[in-house]
Image (tube, coloured by chain):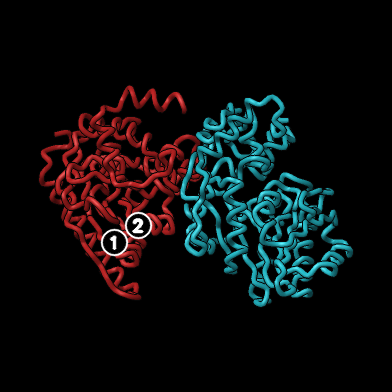
Chain colours: A cyan, B red
C-alpha cells in the first residue's frame, strides 16, 4: 500500500446482496476491487469489477494488477446452487487457489465467510455450540462436504501461514433484503414445507448486521474462528407464522419416506440436505465474536420477519417467483 | 400453534399461575424462547395442567422446598422410577410452583426423545433437554435449575420387585457439580414406583422398537400418592479428583437420597393414602 493511500481490498462473490451491503459500508475507507465467479456485475462509484473463474489462470492477473492489503472471501457457493462437484471445485479447490495467491502476493488480512451448516443438524446436538464443537455436516450429508472442507483448508492456512491473518466467520441464517440462501427462500414463500411434528430452534441475523460484522472483523483485525449469531432464538414454525407463510406439512417419519418425497419432488426449496435442518436445532454461541469485537446486532427477529411479511404483500416480489 | 397456544392458555392458565411463571428469574428471547427451546408461554400451559394432576391425581406432598435456592445454579439429584418420567414432571412442578421462590425446571431427558415427533419439541418447550454433559454444563453457567436422575434408565425401567432399591448412580453429575461449583439438592421420590408397576421387561420388543425397555404392566397410570422430600444442599469441591474420590462423593449423595426415600416411606400410610 502506498503511503497516504486507502488500503485496497478484493471482495469475492461481489454480485451477492451481502457483498453489496458490505461494499457500501467499506467504499469510503477502502479501495475495492470486486470479483464474481458466476456473472458480470456492475457497480457505481467506479469500483473495478471482474467476472472470472476462480480456478482459471487469469484469476491471478487481478492480483498482478492490484496490490491488495486484504481479501474478503464471500463468494462461497451455497448447497442450493449448482451440483456437488462444481461446488467442490469452486469452494474448496478455488479457495485453495485464492489462499495460495494471497500468500504469493503477501496479502496480510483475509476474511472468509463460512456457515453454521458445518456443525450439522442431528438429534443429539447440544445447544449453544461454540467454535470448538466438532463439525458433523459431512458425516450427515455429502451435499455439505465442500463447506466443511473449505473450513478445514482455511484452518490449515490459519496455522501454517501465520503471517496471513485470517478470520473465519460462521454466521447463523443470514436473512433480509436480497438474501437468497435456502432459509431465506423458505421464509419468502407463501407455502413453506414443514416436517410434521418438528419445529427446531433457529437463529437469524439481518443482512445489515452481518455486513457490519464483516466490516468490524476487517477493521479490528483479530484473526481466528468466530460464530456470528445474536442472542435470540425462535422455533422454525413460529418464524414461518411471523413471516406470513402457510405451512405445507411433509411426513417426517420414517426418515426414509421424507427423503424419498424430497427426491421425488426435486423441489429446490426442499432438498435432501435441508431435511435435518428442518428437524433438529443447530444453535450456535456467538459470544466469542460479540466479546472480541464488542459487537451487538441492531436488527431484531421482528425486523427480519416484518420484511418477509411485507414482501408477500408486494405483487412483484422477486423472491417469490 | 399461533391459534392453539393462546386458546389453551386462555382456557387453562389462571392469572395467578401466569404471574407466578412470569416471576421466575429466567432470561428468554423476544419470542419467549431460550437456546434450548424452553418457551415461557408453553411452560404456563404445562404448569397449569401438571399442577392439577400434581394436586388432584397424585396428591403430591413436597417437603423441604426451602432448600432449593431462589436464584443461581443448582443440581437437583433424585431417584428415578415408574417407567415414564412422571417423577421428573412432579419434581419440575414442585420446583416451578415453589412458594419459597419458583424456578424454571430443566430436566435432562433420554436421547431418543428429540427424534419423536411433537413430543421432542413439547419436552424442550417445557424445559427438557437432551442429556448431554455439554448442555448441562452450559445450563449451569446460565444459572439454571437442572434436574438429573443419575440412575438413568436403570432406575426408570426397573421392575416392581426392585422398587426403592437404588441402582448404580452415574458420575457425570458430580463432575459437573465440582467443575461448575454447583450445590446439589438431593431428592427422595416415593410413590412413582407404584404408578406403573412393571412385572417384566419385554426385551425383544424393546430391541425391535429401539426403546431402552418395554414393560409388561397395566396400561394405566395408577393414582399412587407421591411424596417428595428435598434435602439440604450439598457442596463438593476439589481439583482433579481421582475416580475413587468422585465415587466416594457420589456415594454420599446416594446415601442422602436413600435417607430421604426412607423418610418418605415412613410418612406414607399406603400406596393411595
View extreme (front): residue:
A4
Q: Is residue A167 above or below residue A82?
A: below
Mark carried by residue A33: none
- Please give the residue where the numbered disc 2 appears in the rendered image: B140
Q: CA distance from mark 2 to mark 1?
A: 8 Å
What percent of the width, then of the height, locates residue B198? 32, 40
Lateral position of residue B27 relative to residue B65, left or right: right
**Which residue occupies the foreground of this view, A89 or A293?**
A293
What percent of the width, then of the height, locates residue B217? 34, 36
Between disc 2 and disc 1, whose residue precedes?
2
Label 1 SS? loop
Graded by Cα atoms within 10 Å as few (under 14), some (14 to 19) or many (20 or more), the crowding at tag 1 reads many
What percent of the width, then of the height, locates residue A257? 64, 35
Judge whether residue B214 can be spotted in this image. no
| Figure quadrant of the N terminus of chain A | bottom right
**Which residue occupies the foreground of this view, A198 or A320?**
A320
The chain containing the residue under callout 2 comes to B
What percent of the width, then of the height, locates residue A168? 62, 63
Lateral position of residue B239 relative to residue A114, left or right: left
Mark carried by residue B182: 1
Lateral position of residue B13 relative to residue A212, left or right: left
The residue shown at (64%, 75%) is A159
The residue shown at (13%, 50%) is B263
The residue shown at (75%, 70%) is A102
The residue shown at (67%, 44%) is A181
| Figure quadrant of the C terminus of chain A | top right
Number of numbered discs overlaid on the protein picture: 2
The chain containing the residue under callout 1 comes to B
| Residue A191: quadrant of the picture | top right
Graded by Cα atoms within 10 Å as few (under 14), some (14 to 19) or many (20 or more), the crowding at tag 2 reads many
Label 2 SS? helix
- Disc 2 + disc 1, Cβ < 8 Å: yes
Amino acid at each position: 500500500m502506498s503511503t497516504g493511500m486507502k488500503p485496497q481490498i478484493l471482495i469475492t462473490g461481489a454480485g451477492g446482496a451481502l457483498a453489496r451491503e458490505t461494499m457500501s459500508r467499506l467504499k469510503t475507507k477502502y479501495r475495492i476491487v470486486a470479483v464474481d465467479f458466476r456473472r458480470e456485475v456492475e457497480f457505481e462509484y467506479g469500483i473495478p469489477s471482474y467476472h472470472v473463474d476462480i480456478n482459471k489462470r487469469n484469476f491471478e492477473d487481478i492480483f498482478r494488477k492490484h496490490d491488495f492489503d486484504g481479501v474478503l472471501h464471500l463468494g462461497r457457493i451455497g448447497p442450493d446452487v449448482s451440483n456437488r462437484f462444481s461446488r467442490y471445485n469452486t469452494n474448496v479447490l478455488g479457495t485453495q487457489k485464492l489462499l495460495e495467491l494471497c500468500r504469493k502476493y503477501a496479502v496480510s488480512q483475509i476474511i472468509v465467510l463460512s456457515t453454521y451448516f458445518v456443525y450439522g443438524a442431528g438429534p443429539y446436538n447440544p445447544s449453544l455450540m461454540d467454535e470448538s464443537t466438532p463439525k458433523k455436516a459431512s458425516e450427515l450429508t455429502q451435499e455439505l462436504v465442500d463447506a466443511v472442507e473449505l473450513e478445514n483448508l482455511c484452518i490449515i492456512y490459519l496455522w501454517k501461514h501465520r503471517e496471513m491473518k485470517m478470520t473465519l466467520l460462521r454466521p447463523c441464517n443470514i436473512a433480509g433484503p436480497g438474501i437468497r440462501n435456502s432459509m431465506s427462500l423458505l421464509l419468502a414463500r407463501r407455502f413453506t414445507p414443514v416436517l410434521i411434528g418438528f419445529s427446531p430452534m433457529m437463529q437469524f441475523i439481518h443482512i445489515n448486521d452481518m455486513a457490519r460484522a464483516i466490516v468490524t472483523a476487517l477493521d479490528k483485525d483479530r484473526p481466528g474462528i468466530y460464530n456470528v449469531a445474536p442472542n435470540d432464538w425462535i422455533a422454525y414454525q413460529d418464524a414461518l407464522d411471523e413471516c406470513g407463510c402457510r405451512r405445507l406439512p411433509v411426513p417426517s417419519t420414517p426418515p426414509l419416506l421424507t427423503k424419498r418425497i424430497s427426491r421425488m419432488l426435486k423441489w429446490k426449496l426442499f432438498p435432501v440436505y435441508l431435511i435435518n435442518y428442518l428437524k433438529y436445532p443447530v444453535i450456535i454461541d456467538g459470544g466469542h465474536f460479540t466479546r472480541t469485537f464488542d459487537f451487538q446486532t441492531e436488527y431484531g427477529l421482528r425486523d427480519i420477519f416484518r420484511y418477509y411479511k411485507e414482501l408477500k404483500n408486494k405483487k412483484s416480489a422477486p423472491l417469490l417467483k | 400453534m399461533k391459534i392453539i397456544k393462546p386458546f389453551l392458555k386462555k382456557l387453562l392458565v389462571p392469572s395467578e399461575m401466569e404471574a407466578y411463571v412470569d416471576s421466575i428469574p429466567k432470561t428468554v428471547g423476544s419470542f419467549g424462547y431460550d437456546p434450548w427451546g424452553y418457551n415461557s408461554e408453553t411452560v404456563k400451559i404445562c404448569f397449569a395442567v401438571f399442577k392439577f394432576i400434581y394436586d388432584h391425581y397424585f396428591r403430591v406432598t413436597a417437603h423441604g422446598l426451602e432448600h432449593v435456592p431462589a436464584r443461581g445454579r443448582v443440581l437437583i439429584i433424585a431417584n428415578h422410577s415408574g417407567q415414564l418420567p412422571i417423577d421428573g414432571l412432579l419434581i419440575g412442578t414442585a420446583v416451578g410452583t415453589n412458594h419459597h421462590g419458583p424456578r424454571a425446571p430443566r430436566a435432562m431427558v433420554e436421547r431418543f426423545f428429540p427424534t419423536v415427533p411433537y413430543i421432542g419439541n413439547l419436552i424442550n418447550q417445557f424445559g427438557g433437554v437432551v442429556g448431554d454433559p455439554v448442555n448441562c454444563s452450559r445450563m449451569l453457567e446460565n444459572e439454571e435449575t437442572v434436574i438429573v436422575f443419575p440412575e438413568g434408565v436403570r432406575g426408570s425401567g426397573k421392575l416392581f420387585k426392585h422398587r426403592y432399591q437404588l441402582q448404580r448412580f452415574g458420575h457425570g453429575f458430580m463432575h459437573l457439580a465440582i467443575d461448575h461449583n454447583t450445590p446439589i439438592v438431593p431428592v427422595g421420590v416415593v410413590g412413582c414406583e407404584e404408578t406403573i408397576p412393571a412385572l417384566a421387561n419385554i426385551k425383544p420388543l424393546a430391541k425391535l422398537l429401539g426403546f431402552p425397555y418395554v414393560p409388561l404392566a397395566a396400561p394405566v397410570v395408577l393414582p399412587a400418592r407421591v411424596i417428595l422430600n428435598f434435602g439440604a444442599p450439598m457442596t463438593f469441591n476439589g481439583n482433579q479428583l481421582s475416580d475413587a474420590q468422585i465415587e466416594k462423593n457420589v456415594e454420599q449423595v446416594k446415601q442422602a437420597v436413600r435417607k430421604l426415600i426412607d423418610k418418605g416411606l415412613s410418612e406414607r400410610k399406603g400406596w393411595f393414602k
